[in-house]
Image (spheres, grey):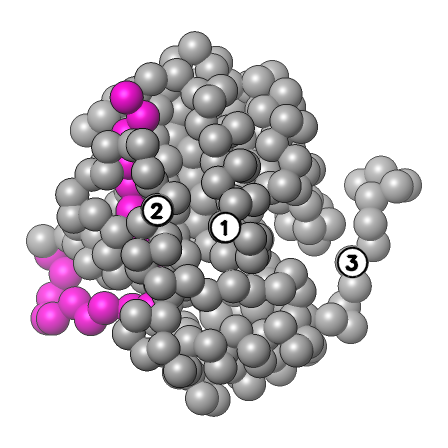
């Protein structure tokens, strides 16, 4: 870690570490576990959201690598490495897959360099940058990815930390403009469609102490981020309901984390 890398602030709960806690990881601090338990006390389904979001990532990446032949993935807001990370899923299908992770949290940076190593045939890289700086993301990612070929742009649980819809649109337009036709956009986002009141209670509790600040949108609002793209079936739905595996037993319950995948024409 360079001398000018921001220090890890363990006094303020942070999204990446709380998410890591909900997923059963160990890379978190007491302040993160306290916030995670506070939210879980009145919204116990939040852990289901986290698990469903990771399941969505696995199925979306597997589909894109296996069925669409995608060999390049740009994963922005990757969070702390846990299990079934994007490069592990993609390279299990295609060992030559190339994956670039982007995040701006110093703890994520420290772990990413150690854990996100990838296969010998493929490549895995990490970019220390903010979603709000797409030009830096693209210039750094271009060291590993070939933008003349399709790329899957992964934005799982990160757009919700940009509260202005116009700013989100601007970021998406800049990123997608750099990608070749046949590229894909993959998004997951918390929504208030299932339980409007509690969804906003969670956001308020988070924003009182946590960082970065969280925005909850409607499913219809999330759907607008795919405007101009070919949205794949089944559209923007609960992450648990996006092409669930046939082997999953019992009824698949919807969660308040929605996801979708779309193709750039």
Cα separation, mark 2 vs mark 3, equals: 35 Å
Closest to the camera, between mark 2 and mark 3, is 2
Q: Where is residue 176 in the image (x, y as percent from the top left)?
A: 44, 27
Q: Say which quadrant the C terminus sits in.
A: top left
Q: Choose top left, top right, bottom left or bottom right for residue 131.
A: top right
- Name the outermost residue toward the bottom: 41
Q: How crowded is mark 3: few (under 14 residues within 10 Å), some or many (20 or more)?
A: few
Q: Position of residue 199 (x, y in %)?
A: 42, 76
Q: Choose top left, top right, bottom left or bottom right for residue 63.
A: top left
Q: Name the residue under label 3.
A: 8
In the rendered structure, the answer to whether residue 57 lies left or right of residue 147 reads left
**Position above or below: 188 against 254:** above
In the rendered structure, the answer to whether residue 260 lies left or right of residue 135 reads left
The residue under the point 30% across, 70% down is: 193
Residues rendered magenta in the picture: 247-265
Q: Which numbered marker is on residue 197? A: none
Q: Which numbered marker is on residue 224? A: 2
Q: What element carries label 3?
A: loop
Q: Is mark 2 on a helix, strand or loop?
A: helix
Q: Name the residue under label 1.
A: 165
Circle 1/circle 2 CB separation < 8 Å? yes
The residue under the point 26% across, 61% down is: 238
């Amino acid at each position: 870690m360079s001398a000018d890398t921001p220090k890890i602030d363990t006094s303020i709960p942070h999204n990446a570490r709380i998410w890591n806690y909900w997923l059963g990881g160990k890379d978190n601090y007491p302040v993160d576990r306290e916030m995670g338990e506070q939210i879980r006390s009145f919204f116990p389904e939040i852990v289901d959201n986290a698990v469903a979001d990771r399941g969505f990532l696995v199925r979306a990446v597997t589909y894109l690598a296996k069925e669409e032949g995608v060999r390049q993935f740009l994963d922005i807001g990757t969070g702390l490495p846990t299990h079934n990370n994007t490069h592990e899923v993609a390279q299990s299908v295609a060992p030559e897959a190339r994956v670039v992770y982007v995040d701006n949290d110093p703890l994520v940076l420290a772990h990413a360099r150690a854990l996100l190593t990838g296969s010998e045939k493929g490549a895995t890289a990490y970019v220390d940058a903010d979603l709000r700086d797409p030009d830096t993301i693209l210039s750094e990612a271009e060291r590993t990815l070939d933008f003349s070929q399709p790329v899957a742009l992964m934005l799982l649980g990160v757009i919700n930390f940009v509260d202005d819809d116009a700013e989100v649109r601007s970021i998406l337009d800049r990123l997608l403009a750099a990608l070749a036709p046949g590229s894909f956009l993959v998004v997951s986002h918390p929504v208030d469609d299932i339980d409007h009141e509690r969804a906003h209670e969670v956001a308020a509790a988070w924003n009182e102490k946590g960082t970065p600040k969280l925005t909850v949108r409607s499913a219809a609002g999330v759907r607008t981020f795919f405007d101009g793209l070919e949205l794949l079936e089944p559209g923007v739905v609960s992450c648990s309901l996006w092409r669930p595996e046939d082997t999953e037993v019992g009824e698949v319950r919807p969660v308040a984390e929605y996801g979708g995948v779309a193709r750039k024409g």
